Image: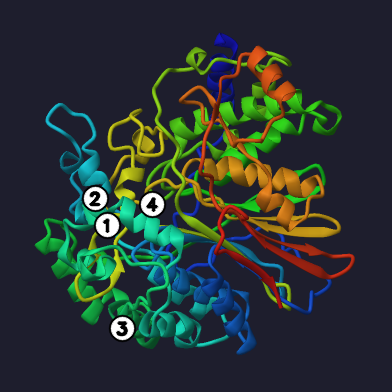
Amino acid sequence: MKCLLNWRVTLLGLLLSGSVAYAADSRPPASPAAAPAAHVIDRRPGHAGIASANFHATQAGLDVLAKGGNAFDAAIAVAATLSVVEPESSGIGGGFMAVLHRAGDGREVFIDARETAVAAVNLRDYLNPDGSPNRDNALNGPLSAGIPGQPAGLAWLAAHYGKLPLKESLAPAIRIARDGFEPDRRLIGAITDREKDIRRWPASVAKYLPNGQPPLAGQLWRDPDQARTLELLGEHGFDGFYRGETASRLVAAVRAAGGNWTAKDLESYQVKERTPITLDYRGYRVVTAPPASSGGVAVAEILNILSGYDLAKLDEAHRTHLIIEAMRRAFRDHNDYLGDPDFVQMPLDMLLSPYYAAGLRQTILADKATPSSMLPVSAGAEPGMHTTHFSVIDADGNIASVTLTVNYTMGSTFVAAGTGVLLNDEMDDFALVPNKPNVYGLLGSAANAPAPGKRMLSSMTPSIVFGKDRVGVIGSPGGSTIITQVLEGILAFIDGKDAAGIAGQKRFHHQYMPDRVDVEPGAFDAATADALTRMGHTLKERNPWGYMNVVTWDLKTNKLDAASDPRRESGLGKVQ
């Protein structure tokens, strides 16, 4: 495998010899991203479609559309409602990334509302005496939390892309938080699973363990503190969360529990607009997430590799083999190069180059797996299954593909007293120790080391796919498997599957390390599994998988199709 390593080094040198390594979009947040050529669609669907992981959230988005809002107002309503009814996966104590398409002028933009490290971040807080990662501090309590980006991102969407005042788009979430809702089985299960950690924090116990126990099915559950926090956000925008009453309570609660937030950390938070990654694959235009997401780069690299094959002519085993090998190589580069574009220079010209992909393609054998041990060796752990995604197309053809997270299930489990805000535990997404896996088994280099104000690398990969006759809005939760699930969703869309077929298809995943293929039960028939094993692939069945939410638009018939993942019983994809 020396040829692969030599190819990478040689091509990197060639690409960088004539130009400085590309550092994407390190400009002030108020400046709009320099978008590629506009992609205007000459028709409008005339009706709307939303797919999210919870029926309350989908209905909230549809209610806001009915009040005259657009897809971006609906996105605010869906995201805020998920914060109330699905806190195990996302919330205003976390962050989001979104790819937007504006119908009027075809403008496409990536909204980066990712969390950031505090100014006082100290790597020693996340290390044990022997230098190994301290996973408790990285995953639990206030030290694990970055400064939330979601509230600022929602205010940014309302101010720059929505039609309604922010408070109107937040109204459904505020109503549900105040009047109450019945928690679903998944939320009850998440609280039960994290009960031991929740009990460490009094405000968390008060919110998630009413009467000292997890909530019961059918029990009405209210969240008045979060309702008040959302009201202040709606009334005052950015200042309603990052300054004033809410900010003071957040800082006081975090510092009282041993954290190191300051008022300046909150006031200094900035939403970033960035240029999406755009590529053509077999006549389809894929618009996806740039760094500080790692997902779009990896998806683009995989698709560039696969563009050299006619996958439709291959049997299932050989088609899958090539996809796995492309995944392996993209995740290897993911670990080496990627980080916050405002802090590190990345060779994106190389990683996104079809010539680089052609070189990687030459290292793939047609019927034999490439052991990851033949690349630089490190160890990984289990990929996780958290986060949430929703997709929106409105009647005018505005599109929002939005992925939100608090990282691990129930985030840090730390609720800031008096706010109802469950904080994220995104500090674990930094490479706290180079080439040591985080909770999702992902590795990282110094490019993703923590620093004041820095965004941690994310796997979130909200994407939009434009074809001659169809448009697809695709994304998924799932930790490190987000990237491969979105990739497989894009390939399924290109193969002609409808929204339900894309969301429900069986999945597989390879992330370089550990060197195995994680497989959803039933993904491969016996003959395909046997053929892959004989090629040298190690298959391991696993569950659960992320809950994908998809909206498609047939441009010939003007029909929208929305589907939520059948693995999540309370999800809802709805066309109205």
Q: CA distance from mark 1 to mark 4?
A: 11 Å
Are the residues flagged by discs 2 and 1 in contact, CB closer than 8 Å?
yes
Are the residues flagged by discs 1 and 3 in contact, CB closer than 8 Å?
no
Are the residues flagged by discs 1 and 4 in contact, CB closer than 8 Å?
no
Given residues 576 and 378, the one toward you in this image is 576
Give the amino acid at mark 1. Thr
Q: Position of residue 347 (x, y in %)?
A: 52, 36
What's the residue at 82%, 49% (across, down)?
Answer: 496
Q: Residues within 10 Å of mark 4 (few under 14, many from 20)?
A: many
Q: Which residue is mark 2?
A: 140
Q: CA distance from mark 2 to mark 1?
A: 6 Å
Q: Quadrant of the N terminus?
A: top right
Q: Earlier in the sequence, mark 4 or mark 3?
A: 3
In front: mark 1 or mark 3?
Answer: 1
Seen in the image, is 253 located left or right of residue 514? left
Give the amino acid at mark 2. Asn
Q: Position of residue 400 (x, y in %)?
A: 61, 66
Q: Residues within 10 Å of mark 1 (few under 14, many from 20)?
A: many
In front: mark 1 or mark 4?
Answer: 1
Q: Residues within 10 Å of mark 2 (few under 14, many from 20)?
A: many
- Disc ID at residue 407: 4
Given residues 554 and 219, the one toward you in this image is 219
Q: Which residue is mark 1?
A: 413
The secondary structure type at the circle numbered 3 is helix
Q: Which residue is mark 3?
A: 228
What's the residue at 18%, 29% (across, down)?
Answer: 131
The secondary structure type at the circle numbered 4 is loop
